[in-house]
Image (cartoon, helix red, strand yellow):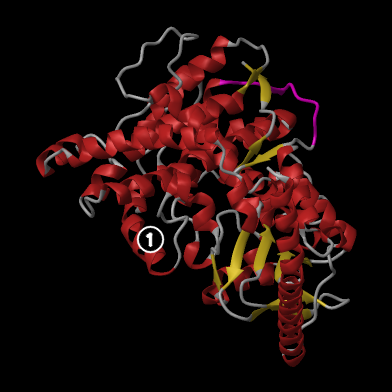
Amino acid sequence: MSQSIIDQAQSIGLQILPYLTKWYSVIILTGLIYLISINLKNYINAKRLGCQNPPFFKLAGFTGVPALLEVVKRKNDGRLADYADEVFEVYNSNAIYLNVCGVLKIIFTIDPENIKAVLATQFNDFSLGTRHAHFAPLLGDGIFTLDGNGWKDSRAMLRPQFAREQIAHVKSLEPHVQILAKHIKSNGFNTFDIQELFFRFTVDTATEFLFGESVHSLYDQKLGLEFPNDIPGRENFATAFNVSQKYLATRTYMQSFYFLTNPKEFKECNKKVHHLAQYFVNKALAMTPEQLDEASKDGYTFLYELVKQTRDPKVLQDQLLNIMVAGRDTTAGLLSFCVFELARNPEVWAKLRKEIIDNFGEGEDSNVDAITFENLKKCKYLKAVLDETLRLYPSVPVNFRTATRDTTLPRGGGKDGTKPIYIPKGSTVAYTVYKTHRMEEYYGKDSRVFRPERWENMPRLGWAYVPFNGGPRICLGQQFALTEASYVIARLAQMFTTIESRDDTYPPKKCIHLTMNLEDGAFVGMK
């Protein structure tokens, strides 16, 4: 490049610099005016409605980015749930808030009345916000990602699939329990991670219930068992599903910055999950109505019933994967946390075993046929054990909603926390059930202690206990998950006399993807 050309470029640059500076000034001024006007509008509206802000989360600063980064860091360290617990203790409040660049308001709350407002009494004031964008690469357009009419249509389609007669069929679980027991016995009384087995167990039961065939991930070389069927992509499915959910969780906690999390590994794992789901969907769509009826005669299959309502392969794939998240992960997490605590509390395990044995026998004298949906519901201490597990370890410890209009939350504002909080349109409300379930106001001084006996005379808790969400979006599959967990715990109590904890870490680190499980596994010895 000649010196003359360089000189010309510098001359042009000097000429346009004043114009650029002018435009930068206009942009900055416009931004300031917008920022001032929106905050003034919110201040006036809040004043008119008698609202006051809760304590400000100081770590967030002006941009809110440091707080979001800290949340992601704590999530990756397995300490996010306990971090939220600590923050509310520090501020001694049932609500705190932060702002993102002075515009977007994010409120965190543990107050049952606020949770009730978001999920029920003011349901139409809130939506899933950007959740669809967060989850769409894996889950597409399903019941967990859609709002409005799309969600209503999904719920209407799926509700019949969770009728009592469907969830009452526990006999299909027994073959998988037998393989699970073989794995446990193969360890002798040595230390092993039962959570890893539970996740394989629930992917096996969920794929059988949803797709009509199990991927049989518990069949492995350790037991010397050959796969009883040939499903393409089976070997990659469980791992890919886990990895994809890990990325979805990070996208969720990054909120509006979710698009920064979209690596190659995420895309490849999504593709593997979709490949297996498409195999089953295409197989079902190729069947005649007579073939579908024949395939269903020995047991209920979610996909076969869904095909009778829609033949859109994308709708079928998305809804199946949405239910897979719930049917597999929540149950695996519940079972893992339950055994983790039972191993640490031998007196609870002994009391639970007695109830199960009194009702269904043990060992060779086990009356497995008597372990039905109806009979499991009669086991009050088993129910208390699962309720206590879900109290301390709710499947979704933190959840979010976005305001669809200017609205309020009933409590948490002001110095005494009794004033309503103004929620501008577009604001995010995060409700932290994990902390709500530990509030001494509802659960006593020992609220952080695993004690199933508290449920024997528990007063009505209302929205202080919401392990399956609440309101119009309450979990459709809660009875399905509780029935499966009850059956597995009952069978383990019949087959094993001792569960011994082999983990000194307490409280345990918790992995939060779309649902919660133990970060490092549940290490026990069983005999």
What residue span does the magenta drawing correspond to?
496-506
Is residue 208 toward the left or the right of residue 399 in the image?
left
Q: Residue at horizontal 81%, vertical 58%? A: 440
Q: Quadrant of residue 489?
A: top right
x, y percentage for residue 269? 48, 33
Does the magenta run of residues contain 212?
A: no
x, y percentage for residue 22? 75, 75
Q: Is residue 118 above or below residue 259?
A: below
Q: Residue at horizontal 71%, vertical 73%? A: 23
Is residue 152 toward the left or the right of residue 134 in the image?
left
**Prevailing secondary structure of the magenta residues:** loop
Q: Residue furthest bottom?
A: 48
From the image, tell me which residue sits under label 1.
Answer: 155
| The N terminus - image quarter | top right
Q: Quadrant of residue 468?
A: bottom right
Q: Is residue 239 above or below residue 81?
A: above
Residue 290 seen in this snapshot: yes
x, y percentage for residue 235? 42, 21
x, y percentage for residue 448? 79, 47
Residue 450 seen in this snapshot: no
Q: Residue at horizontal 64%, vertical 31%? A: 339
Three-letter amino acid code of the residue under disc 1: Arg
Q: Secondary structure at mark 1?
A: helix
